[in-house]
C-alpha cells in the first residue's frame, strides 16, 4: 500500500507530499485507495457525487446508535462512529452491493448487443417467482421518482459513464413497474450501484463505498451532538416509552 | 494462553476437556482467563455475583444501540453486540474502574492500621475542592440505599472478601453524606469496584468485567428483539420526535 | 427485560438482589437472558460447558485484533474487545449457527421415528452435489476425533440432552466419512450447535452464544497483554515481513 | 441535519440533488457536515489536504486488525472497517486531538500580540517537569524533518490559514529541540492539529477527522486484500511465532 524512508512517503506509487497533498481531494484519494490508480477528472467527478449522496440521511438507526454511544463513552469518539458504521448492513445502505451484484452477474460475458429488455423481463420474473424484493428500485417516500437518481445519471452521462449497467437497471425498473402496476423508480441506492458498475468497481467492495460516506456523516452527527445534544433525551424518551408500552 | 495437539487442548495450564468442561462455570472460567488461575469456591461465588449484577440494566443507551444495529444489519449479530459494548465507557458502566483506581491508589503501601476515616475525609475534601463527582456513590433512583450493595457486601463477607477496600468506600460514602448533607449511598458500581479490589483485580481490567457482563445482557436484548421486535418503532418514534422538535 | 423502583430491581421477573445475586452463576444468567427463564440444574451444567468450550482458542485472528487495538487505544478497553468480537463471523466461530440451522431445518415437523440415517445420506449428497463444505465436521488438527466432542456429548447425555439432533449430526459425520473416505469427526463447533438444538435454542441466536464466550476470552487476552505485552512485537514483525515480501 | 419530502432532499440547508451532487467533493462535504456550512475554495483545499494525509500509513495495527477481521467475517465488511477504526485512539492517530487541545487552550483569550516564544518556553518546561511527551513533535523515522509538514504548511499559507496556532507549534518545536538537544520536528499529526485550529475546528472533533481518513484507508486495505490476500499468512505467522517465543 505504501512505504516510507526518512525523507519520503509513498502511497500506492505516488509521492504523498509531492504528488498528492494539495493535488487530490478525499474522494479521489478513496478511488486511488480502492482501485490502485488515480481517477481521471471524469471518474473523480462521478465518484465524488456517489460518495456525497450517501453521507447524510438524517436520524437513521446508525446515527441514533452513534449518538447514544457517544453519550455513554464520549472519551472514545472512534467507538461511537464504529457503532453506527456497524449498521451499514443488508437492510440499510447495503443495497448498492446487491444491485451491483445483480447487474454484474447478469451482464458478465454477454455480447455488446445483448437484449437488455429481455434480460430485465427474466430478472423480474425470477424475483416475482421467488417473491423476493428487487434491490435498487422503489422508495417509500420518493415517488414517482427519487430526485437523486436523474441527477446522478446526468453526472455519469456527461462524464461518459452511463452505459449498459444503467440501461439494464432502467429496463428492470420499467418492467417491474409494468408487471406490478405500481411506482418502482430507481432509487439512489440503485443508481449508485449501477454507476459503481460503470466505474468497474467489483460488487464486493460496494459496501465499502457506503462505509466511507457514512463515516463522514456519523462524524457530522457527533459534531452536531456537541453543539446541540439530543442523545440523553432520545434515551430517556425511549426508556419511558418502552415502559409505558409494557404497563 | 493455550495450546493444542491432535489429541489435547490445554487452556492456561488446564486440560480443557478433562479438567474444565463440566467442571467449571462461565464466571469461574472468566476468573481463570483474567487472573491465570482457577478461583477458589469462595472467589467463584463472589465473582459470579459481581458479574451477574452488571448483566441487565434495562433499556440503556447500549441496549438501544444494539437493537438498532441489529435492525440495520441482522445478518451480523456480532456487530450489534459490539455496537452496544462500545458504550461501556466513562459515563455508563465504567465507574467500577474509577472507584477501583481510587481505592487501590489510596491504600497502596499503607500500613494495616491506616486510619480509613481520615483518608476518606481527605478524599472527599479533594473531590469537593475540584468540584469533581466521587465515583461509586449516589444513585438517582435507589435511595436511601442501592438494594444491590448490601447483598454484594454480604456475599463478599461470608466468603472472606470484605476487607479494607470495602471499609474505605463505606467511610467515603459516610463522609460525603455528612459533608454534602444528602443521600450518597454506595451504588452497585461502587460495590463492584470495591469487591474487585478485595479479589486483587488491578483497576485497569475492571472495565473488562463490565464488558463481559454486558455482552451477556446485549445478547439477551437481541434474543428478546427476535421474539418481540421494538427497534423499528424506537427508530421511527425518534425520527418523528426529532423532526417535531425542529418544526 | 427488567424494571426498577427505589428499593427493587427486577430482571426478567426475578428480584435481582434477593433471587439472583449469589444464587446464579454467569452462564445460568446468560441462559435466563436468552430464553427468558432460569435453567434447571441440568440445563445449567450443559450450557456452562458449551460456553466454556468457546472461551479460549489461543492466538486467533480475533485475539490478535483485540491486542493490536488495545495497543493503539489502551484507554478504551471496550473498543479492543469489540474489535475482536467483530470476527465472530462465518469463517471462525460462526459455525455452530450453521450446523444448528441445518439440524433444525432437517428435523422440523419430522415424526419421532424419522430415519436419521436416510436423512444424513440425503444431506451429504446435497452438499457433495453443490461441492459445499458440511458445517460441524472435520478439523485440521484434531484427528481422528476432536477431544472436546465426546466430553460435551457425555455431559449432555448425563443431563438428559443427548437426543435426535446429536444423533443426526453423528449420522452425517459417519456418512460423510464413508462417502469421502477420510476422517471427518464432529468438531467442537458442531457438537455445540447440536447440543444447543437439544436445549431448544433457535439457530439464529447461536452466534450470540459464541459472542458471549469470546468476550470472556478476549478480556483474558487483554489481561495477559497487560502482564506480558506482545502486541507491539506482533505489529512490528508483521510490518517488517510484509515489506520483506514486497522487496 | 436534513429532511426529505417526496420530491426534495435537503442536507444542512442545501438541496442535495440540486446544490451538492456534482458540485461538492467528499472532503468539502465532510467540512459541511462537521461545521454546518460549505467551505470556501481555500478551506476546501486545505481541509482536503489534511484528510488525504491521514488516509494511508501502511501496515498499521489498525490495518492489520481490519484485514484479520475481514478474514474471519468476510460477509460483514463494515465490521472489518469498524475493528480497525477502533484503533484511532490515543497512541496512534489520536495525536492531532492532543496538539489541538494544547494550542487552543494556550491561545484562548490571549491578545493578538501574545509572546509565542515565551508561551512555548513555559509549555516545554511544564512537559519536561512532568516528564510528559509533547504531542505533535518528533518522529522515529522522519528526521530531521517530516516531509509532510512543510507541504501542509505551504498549502495552509497560500490559502490564508497559516496563523498563530502554526506559529506557536513552531515555537514549541524549536524550544524543545533547543532544550532537549535533539531533532524534534513538527510531525504530520502536529501539523494537522495546528491547521485544524486555523480552520477553527474545536479540538474535541479532531479525532473525527482522523476517523474519516482512516475509514478511506481501511476500505482500501480490504480492496487490496481482495486482490492479494495477506491476512491468513499474517495470522499463521503470528500464531507460529508466539508459540516459538514460548518454547
Image (cartoon, coloured by chain):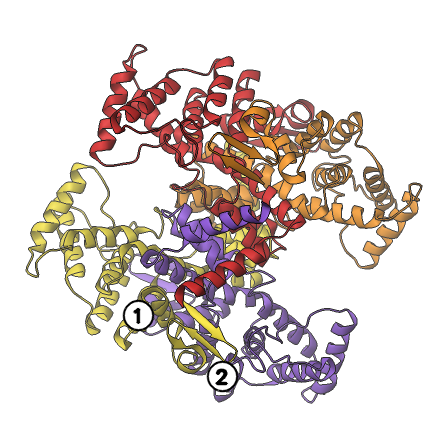
Chain colours: A purple, B red, C orange, D yellow
Is C203 situated left or right of D105 in this image? right
Badge 1 density bin: few <14, some 14–19, many ≥20, Cα 10 Å: some
Element assignment for label 2: helix
Residue at 68% across / 79% down in the picture? A107
Viewer-proximal residue among B100 and D12:
D12
Figure quadrant of the C terminus of chain D: top right
Residue B208: give x, y in percent of width and height: 47, 35
Which residue is painted at 13% across and 42% down in the image?
Answer: D125
Task: Determine whether B105 is above or below A89 in the image.
Answer: above
Residue C184 in percent (x, y) is at 79, 42
Q: Quickly name the residue at label 1.
A: A18
In the picture, the quarter occupied by the N terminus of chain D is bottom left
Residue B133 numbered mark, or none: none
Give the image quarter of residue C11. Answer: top right
Q: Chain of mark 1?
A: A
Q: Are marks 1 and 2 on the same chain?
A: yes
Q: Is residue B157 above or below residue D115?
A: above
**Badge 2: how crowded within 10 Å, few (<14), some, or many (20+)?**
some
**Front in this rendered view, residue C44 or D212:** C44
Q: Is residue C76 above or below residue D215?
A: above
Which residue occupies 27% across, 75% down?
D40
For mark 2, what is the residue?
Answer: A151
- Up-down: is B49 above or below A112? above
Regarding residue C247, the answer to whether it shows in the image is: no
Q: Chain of mark 2?
A: A
Residue B205 location, quadrant: top left
Amino acid at each position: 500500500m505504501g512505504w516510507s524512508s526518512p525523507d519520503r512517503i509513498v502511497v500506492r506509487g505516488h509521492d504523498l507530499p509531492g504528488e498528492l497533498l494539495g493535488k487530490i481531494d478525499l474522494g479521489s484519494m478513496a478511488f486511488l485507495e480502492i482501485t490502485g490508480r488515480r481517477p481521471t477528472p471524469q471518474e473523480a467527478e462521478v465518484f465524488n457525487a456517489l460518495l456525497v449522496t450517501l453521507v447524510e440521511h438524517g436520524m437513521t438507526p446508525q446515527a441514533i446508535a452513534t449518538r447514544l454511544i457517544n453519550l455513554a463513552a464520549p472519551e472514545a469518539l472512534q467507538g461511537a462512529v464504529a457503532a453506527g458504521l456497524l449498521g451499514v448492513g443488508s437492510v440499510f445502505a447495503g443495497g448498492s452491493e446487491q444491485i451491483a451484484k445483480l447487474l454484474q452477474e447478469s451482464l458478465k460475458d454477454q455480447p455488446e448487443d445483448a437484449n437488455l429488455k429481455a434480460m430485465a423481463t427474466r430478472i423480474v420474473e425470477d424475483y416475482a417467482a421467488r417473491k423476493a424484493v428487487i434491490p435498487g428500485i422503489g422508495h417509500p417516500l420518493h415517488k414517482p421518482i427519487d430526485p437523486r437518481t436523474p441527477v446522478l445519471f446526468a453526472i455519469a452521462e456527461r462524464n461518459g459513464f452511463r452505459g449498459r449497467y444503467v440501461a439494464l437497471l432502467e429496463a428492470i425498473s420499467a418492467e417491474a413497474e409494468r408487471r406490478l402496476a405500481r411506482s418502482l423508480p430507481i432509487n439512489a441506492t440503485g443508481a449508485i450501484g449501477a454507476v459503481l458498475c460503470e466505474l468497474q468497481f467489483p460488487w464486493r467492495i460496494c459496501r465499502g463505498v457506503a462505509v466511507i460516506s457514512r463515516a463522514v456523516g456519523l462524524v457530522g452527527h457527533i459534531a452536531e451532538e456537541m453543539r446541540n445534544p439530543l442523545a440523553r433525551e432520545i434515551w430517556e424518551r425511549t426508556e419511558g416509552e418502552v415502559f409505558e408500552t409494557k404497563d
